[in-house]
Image: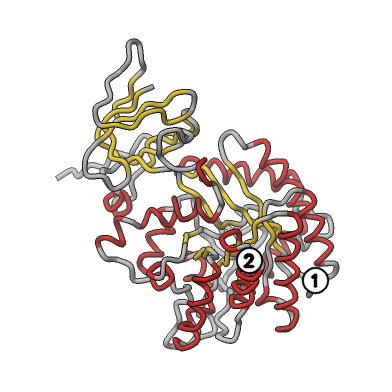
Amino acid sequence: MLFQNAFLENASTQVSFRVQDGRFSEIDPDLVPLSGEETVDLGGKLVLPPFVESHVHLDTCLTAGDPVWNMSGTLFEGIECWSKRKDKLSREDIRERVNRAVRMYAANGVQFIRTHVDVTDPKLTAMQALIELREELRDVMEIQIVAFPQEGILSYPNGKELLTEAVKMGADCVGAIPHFEFTREYSVESLNFAMELAAKYDKLVDVHCDEIDDEASRGLETLAARALEMQMFDKVTASHTTAMHSYNNAYVLRLMRLLKMSKINFVANPLVNTHLQGRVDTYPKRRGITRVKELTAEGINVSFGHDDIFDPWYPMGNGSLRDVVFMGLHVCQMMGYEDIMNSYHFITDNAAKTLHLGDRYGIAEGRPASFIVLDAKNYYDALNQNAAVLASYKEGRKIAEAIPAVRRTLF
Ligand code: FE2
């Protein structure tokens, strides 16, 4: 099949590309159809690699208002709401919601998801459900599972055993939550435990790291030091790291050297952390977003995630990563022309690097023909106009499409 007249990423001229046996076989401006070959005229639209959701909690998604709404919008009321919802958590409940969320994501051009799954549950119900779904949905959505100890590894009964059991069940990544542990000592020990567990079972690591406005929360330096010493490097990801917003600059200057040496990835979640951080401030109120601009300038890999979708902690979300990028650029003050044009990297290549997708990802000859077509000619316009994802192809097969809305003025 030949796809013609596409703007690939930020290219200024159009190209065509051929898909054979589910892979990109040729990419060239001058391709002509073979005899009898099916052609698709993309009409000068933007083609990108598929969007990659690098941080979400699918086990809690689509539960906002059930049974009660979070009226204050705070993290702590969110935890109260979730404890009421948790009573009716079942395998069927999780399966139904995750299936809906995956379809919302697919309609918005997402083909890869890293989901954190709470394993501070003696029954590991969500873990079991997500492992089933990862297999069932594999043809349309690649799901990566982080065993996430929401209530701590050292601070929750049998936390170490539950995390280990989740890894044995088939989690792809080991998580931790150092800022939530009872003590600083527990925080360090929890990170050591998670890293050693990941090394033992050859898993990736993705830590909810310092998601708090406390400038004294410094799990990140321990995580980065272990990643360096254990030579796990970019197998390790630090998610959120919102305390970095509050660190003093002298400390960050010293920390940045370690971060670069460690080669770890970062995931920022601009929607949720703008909403949740700074809640105990009066004025001025901190934004509480990690230092995306500075990390990026230092060549450190940063991606953006949605984190929560319509759940007790975040009451919005429709599976569109466009909104994540839009908020991220505003709150990180990255609104220069080049910043905007290149911002799709936060939800494509950078996220793919975090997920270790390797050469299974990206638009290049020989790679799987997975791509999306947006109703715009470049990403600046796509972002500004909230362009529809006209089509999403996974390994040469169309898995989602959209007919853009028509809006007319009548004057
Ligand atoms: Fe999270």
Q: Quadrant of the C terminus?
A: top left
Q: CA distance from mark 1 to mark 2?
A: 17 Å
Residue pushed farthest left? 411
Residue situated in front as seen by the camera: 244 or 406: 244
Q: Name the residue rendered at 77%, 58% in the picture.
A: 87
Q: Position of residue 333 (x, y in %)?
A: 34, 71
Q: Secondary structure at mark 2?
A: strand
* Location of residue 65 in the rendering, given as x and y in whole percent from the top left corner: 61, 59
Amino acid found under the numbered disc labelled 1 = Tyr
Q: How far across and down, in percent of the image, does residue 52 sit?
A: 49, 49
Using residue 91 as the reference point, say whether residue 218 is left or right of it: left
Residue 357 to residue 153: above or below: above
Which image quarter: residue 42?
Answer: top left
Q: Measuring 56% from the left and 66% from the top, which residue is drawn there?
A: 239
Q: Which residue is mark 1?
A: 156
Return the x and y of residue 320 as percentages of the image width and height.
45, 50
Q: Is residue 282 visible?
A: no
Q: Is mark 1 within 8 Å of ligand 1?
A: no
Q: Is residue 119 left or right of residue 341?
A: right
Structural crowding at the residue carrying mark 1, measured as other residues with C-alpha within 10 Å and reported as few (<14), some (14–19) or many (≥20) = some
In depth, the one of 234 and 406 nearer the eye is 234
Q: Which residue corresponds to mark 2? A: 207
Name which residue lies at 33% across and 56% down.
342
- Find residue 44 and report its image quarter: top left
